[in-house]
Image: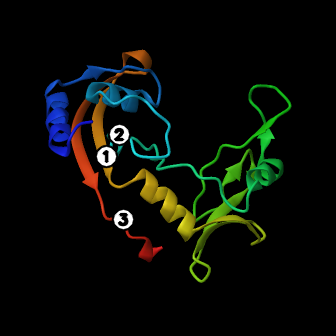
Amino acid sequence: MLSYNEFVEKLNEIKAMGFVKTHRSGPTGIGKTLEDLLGIKENNIAGPDHEKFELKSARKNSQSMLTLFTNAPLPRKVNSVLLDKFGYPSAKGNEKKELHTTVSALNYNNLKGNTGFKVGIDKNASKITFIDNEGKELCYWDNQTLEKAFVKKYPALAYVKADAEGVDSNEKFHFTEAYLLTGFDFQEL
């Protein structure tokens, strides 16, 4: 495991390399390439990639969102209810439904032409909710659950950005910016 100073030194070495060919084509290529260059094994654990921080990377000027972590909403098994109510036929052509969406606090999401749900904040109950277009709460995350998941995954966040050129298996990255984010405050939710 690299110390913080060794990590910064290694990032500077990677920056000096200039453009590096992707180690995997597609959206996850940037993260895979950076992890490989840093000697970090790929994982999908609930904790951080590194002892002291989670590593995330992004292409500069990308409109892609950053997934911090996934955590099923409450009450338990509500994912099945959401899938049943808002899901659509699988693109794989089987009988299963699927549900892939981005949720906003400003507008209801659009699910294959139908109005779906949006995010609400209930400060009195200290929770973040999903609300359907009739104003009904579908599910929620309480602040305590979110804080526990966040703290477990992010003692700190190392966020590295890169210029990108090319496409698919010919994409190349030049890692040029890095930020260490610490001190997240749950009192402001």
Q: Amino acid at mark 3?
A: Phe
How many neighbours does mark 2 have within 10 angstroms: few (below 14), some (14-19), or many (20 or more)?
Answer: many
Q: Is residue 58 above or below residue 131?
A: above
Q: Is residue 87 above or below residue 176?
A: below
Sequence-wise, the earlier of marks 3 and 1 is: 1
Label 1 to label 2, Cα distance in Å? Answer: 6 Å
Q: Residue at x 38, y 40 (%)?
A: 49
The residue that label 1 is drawn on is 159
Residue 57 badge: 2
Q: Quadrant of the N terminus?
A: top left
Decide: few, some or many residues near mark 1? Use Cα within 10 Å; few <14, some 14-19, many ≥20: some
Residue under the image location 54 percent in, 69 percent down: 144
Local SS, label 3 = loop
Q: Amino acid at mark 1?
A: Tyr
Rounded to the nearest angstrom, the CA distance separating label 2 from label 3 is 19 Å
- Contact flag, marks 2 and 3 (Cβ < 8 Å): no
Which callout, 2 or 3, points to the residue nearer the camera? 3
